[in-house]
Image (cartoon, grey):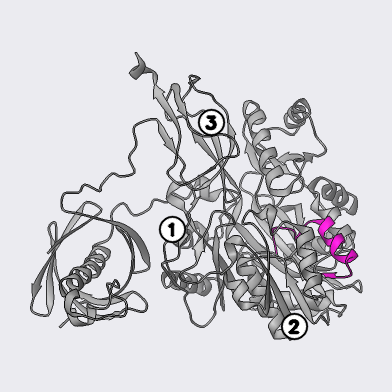
């Protein structure tokens, strides 16, 4: 087993990995950019190394600096988390060449699956169903003729991509040039690689993915599905397991396809096979494989009882994964809500600022994975994910109610969040019926922010302000440790 | 005592240890039960209902969470001078958030059509398109590709064709 692990990431996932390491008795090394000097992950690690400027390219994406930091701190392995360099095959190879262990799949598996075009070809060969599309296109005329052949609408995607970055739906031929340019720019900026591929856009599609897990001894299983159809801008906001759509028979078929897909590239460690599911025909297509830990891994952890991050570390160190497919079961229902610092009322624009108040919900069956505390700054440099709120209950209905209650208890001031928006999704009859497709948020959900502040909120604000006025009238003859706190005089003021 | 938030005036009239609260047509009795400075938390009775609120101060803004909903209220002085601080002359486009200019598709003096993408701003790994709010001409361009901009920073001014004549 490793004695020290460097975590090449930030935010909630770095905190999550540190926790797994602590439970395994492994020392941790955090890395941080200029913007993250006081971040929670830095505070929680045993050691921390400064790796550069706030811009990801100069810090969290700088492979050389990360490997040097690992060697200098005498770590024996690197956990990449998700995003940043987690799906970068050259980084995985460089880590291994430096005699460190990369906690993830082999560089060859990442390369094969990380390239969306190559992976589709590999999957077709392995007999896994794929979406009609075209890869290896370069010039605009090539894109135009391929798009015509597939038929609009089409989806333009970054070959190297994931997480919705560089992805665009194109409805008609006229829009293709501009969308290709934009997708190229986004892809280049996010992944350093501007190759694109196109595929048929399936309307009412559901996004259902399977967690796979393998050790270095050839044993590979799936850990059931995650339904991730609630999305905005192609990014997931609510995930759940089990999927309300799958029958045991479909689950078995898709699970077997997922295992076959992962086996085709000799996969080990945690990975996710994403499928597009057409609810009309009950057919599924391989979409892509994420060769890393997924943001939404906690819902799988809660329903299977496995600690995926600890198992990632253990199999990377050469341990065998001890469970056969037949031994694995799911219990109850889990839902994750991604609490983003973004404003649903203005097109989900990220919201930045200092967290003036931050109180996480608590209670049985509630888990919060977060990388922030009150007083922390949410900057524009990184993904606006504030926290993941995850609940586990005995069935879907109970899990939805638990989530609604937990969201009500989550207090965030200083940045606008998407929590009201997620409440609207959770209380919608379509969500209750499991009918939410990946474009449902754009097409069906008619969400509007409250037009006027509630009476109660105005009374609360007035009381708080009254306290300030009260304090100012008394300030001369008081000797308060924090004279500017409006709260100090509230106790006196109620008498 | 009268306080105005978001153009809504609320009147608090002391009545023994409670207050008579008036907002437009609405009137209720309210009483503070407990205030927790540490958590920015107030518990109060409003019309007999027990409520818990979290309030944070952010200059003129008040972040209030109550009944599971969060509101951002702008405190206004009696004269309401502060209202509308985010309004700009029509056609003056500002950065909705801090970021970096990825592309500038137009130059000064160029004619533009409503909805045309003028500037692409990248923030938090996303592209934000700054589009022409109307048909017109680029009156002035304040940014270059690669430049970092702050929230609310002026990017470009588009003048409508009508006002030019």
Residues rendered magenta in the picture: A82-102
In the image, A406 versus A400, the foreground residue is: A406
Kindly state the secondary structure of the residue where label 3 is placed.
strand
**Is label 3 on the same chain as label 2?**
no
3D distance between C-alphas at marks 3 and 2: 51 Å
Residue A92 is covered by the magenta coloring: yes
Position of the N terminus of chain A by quadrant: bottom right
Number of the front mark, 2 or 1: 2
3D distance between C-alphas at marks 1 and 3: 26 Å
**Which of the labelled discs sits on residue A26, or is there none?**
2
Asked if the residue under mark 2 is in contact with the one under mark 3, i.e. CB atoms within 8 Å, the reply is no
**Which of the labelled discs sits on residue B117, or is there none?**
3
In the image, B149 versus A328, the foreground residue is: B149
Q: Evaluate whether residue A391 shows in this view.
A: yes
Residue at point 68%, 45% (across, down): A189
Q: Evaluate whether residue A247 shows in this view.
A: no
Kindly state the secondary structure of the residue where label 2 is placed.
loop
Q: Position of residue A28 (x, y in %)?
A: 71, 77
Counting residues from the start of the chain, the first of labels 2 and 1 encountered is 2
3D distance between C-alphas at marks 2 and 1: 37 Å
**Subunit of mark 1?**
A
**Subunit of mark 2?**
A
Quadrant of res A315: bottom right
Quadrant of res A43: bottom right
The residue beneath circle 1 is: A416
Residue at point 76%, 27% (across, down): A145
A300 on left or right of B114? right
Q: Count the marks: how many? A: 3
């Amino acid at each position: 087993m490793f004695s020290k692990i460097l975590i090449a990431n930030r935010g909630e996932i770095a905190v999550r990995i540190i926790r797994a390491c602590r439970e395994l008795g492994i020392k941790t090394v955090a890395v941080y950019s200029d913007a993250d000097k006081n971040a929670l992950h830095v505070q929680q690690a045993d050691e921390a190394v400064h790796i550069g400027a706030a811009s990801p390219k100069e810090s969290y994406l700088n492979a050389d600096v990360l490997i040097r930091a690992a060697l200098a701190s005498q770590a024996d392995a690197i956990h990449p988390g998700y995003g940043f360099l987690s799906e970068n095959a050259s980084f995985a190879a460089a880590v291994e060449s430096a005699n460190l262990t990369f906690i993830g799949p082999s560089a060859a598996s990442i390369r094969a699956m990380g390239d969306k075009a190559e992976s589709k070809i590999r999957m077709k060969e392995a007999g896994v169903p794929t979406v009609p599309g075209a890869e290896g296109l370069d010039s605009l005329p090539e894109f135009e003729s391929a798009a015509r052949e597939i038929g609009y609408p089409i989806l333009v995607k970054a070959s190297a991509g994931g997480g919705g970055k560089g992805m665009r739906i194109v409805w008609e031929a006229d829009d293709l040039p501009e969308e290709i340019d934009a997708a190229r720019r986004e892809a280049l900026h996010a992944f350093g690689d501007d190759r694109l591929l196109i595929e048929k856009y399936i309307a009412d599609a559901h996004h259902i993915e399977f967690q796979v897990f393998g050790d270095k001894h050839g044993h590979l299983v799936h850990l059931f599905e995650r339904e991730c159809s609630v999305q905005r801008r192609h990014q997931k906001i609510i995930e759940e397991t089990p999927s309300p759509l799958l029958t045991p028979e479909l689950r078995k078929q898709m699970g077997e396809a997922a295992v076959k897909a992962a086996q085709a590239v000799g996969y080990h460690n945690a990975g996710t096979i994403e499928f597009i599911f057409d609810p009309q025909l009950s057919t599924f297509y391989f979409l892509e494989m994420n060769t890393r830990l997924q943001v939404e891994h906690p819902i799988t952890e809660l329903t299977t009882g496995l600690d995926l991050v600890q198992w990632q570390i253990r199999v990377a160190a050469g341990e065998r994964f001890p469970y056969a497919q037949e031994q694995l079961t799911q219990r109850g229902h889990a839902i994750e809500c991604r609490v983003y610092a973004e404003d649903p009322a203005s097109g989900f624009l990220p919201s930045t600022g200092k967290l003036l108040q931050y109180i996480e919900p608590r209670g049985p069956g509630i888990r919060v994975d977060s990388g922030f505390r009150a007083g922390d700054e949410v900057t524009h440099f990184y993904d606006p994910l504030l926290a993941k709120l995850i609940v586990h209950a005995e069935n879907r209905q109970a899990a939805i109610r638990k989530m609604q209650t937990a969201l009500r208890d989550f207090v965030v001031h200083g940045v606008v969040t998407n929590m009201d928006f997620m409440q609207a999704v959770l209380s919608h009859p379509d969500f209750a019926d499991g009918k939410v497709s990946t474009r449902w948020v754009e097409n069906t959900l008619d969400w509007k922010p409250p037009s006027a502040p509630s009476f109660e909120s105005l009374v609360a604000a007035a009381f708080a302000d009254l306290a300030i006025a009260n304090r100012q009238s008394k300030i001369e003859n008081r000797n308060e440790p924090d004279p500017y706190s409006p709260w100090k005089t509230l106790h006196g003021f109620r008498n | 005592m009268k306080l105005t938030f978001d153009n809504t005036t609320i009147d608090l009239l002391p009545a023994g240890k409670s207050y008579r609260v008036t907002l437009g047509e609405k009137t209720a009795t309210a009483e503070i039960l407990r205030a927790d400075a540490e958590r920015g938390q107030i518990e109060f009775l409003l019309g007999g209902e027990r409520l818990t609120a979290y309030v944070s101060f952010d200059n003129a803004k008040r972040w209030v969470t109550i009944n599971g909903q969060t509101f951002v209220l702008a405190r206004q002085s009696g004269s309401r001078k502060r209202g509308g601080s985010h309004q700009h002359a029509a056609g003056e486009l500002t950065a909705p958030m801090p970021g970096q200019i990825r592309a500038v598709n137009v130059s000064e003096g160029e004619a533009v059509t409503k909805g045309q993408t003028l500037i692409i701003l990248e923030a938090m790994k996303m592209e934000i398109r700054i589009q022409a709010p109307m048909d017109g001409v680029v009156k002035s361009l304040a940014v270059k590709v690669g430049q970092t901009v702050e929230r609310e920073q002026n990017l470009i001014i588009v003048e409508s064709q009508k006002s030019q004549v």
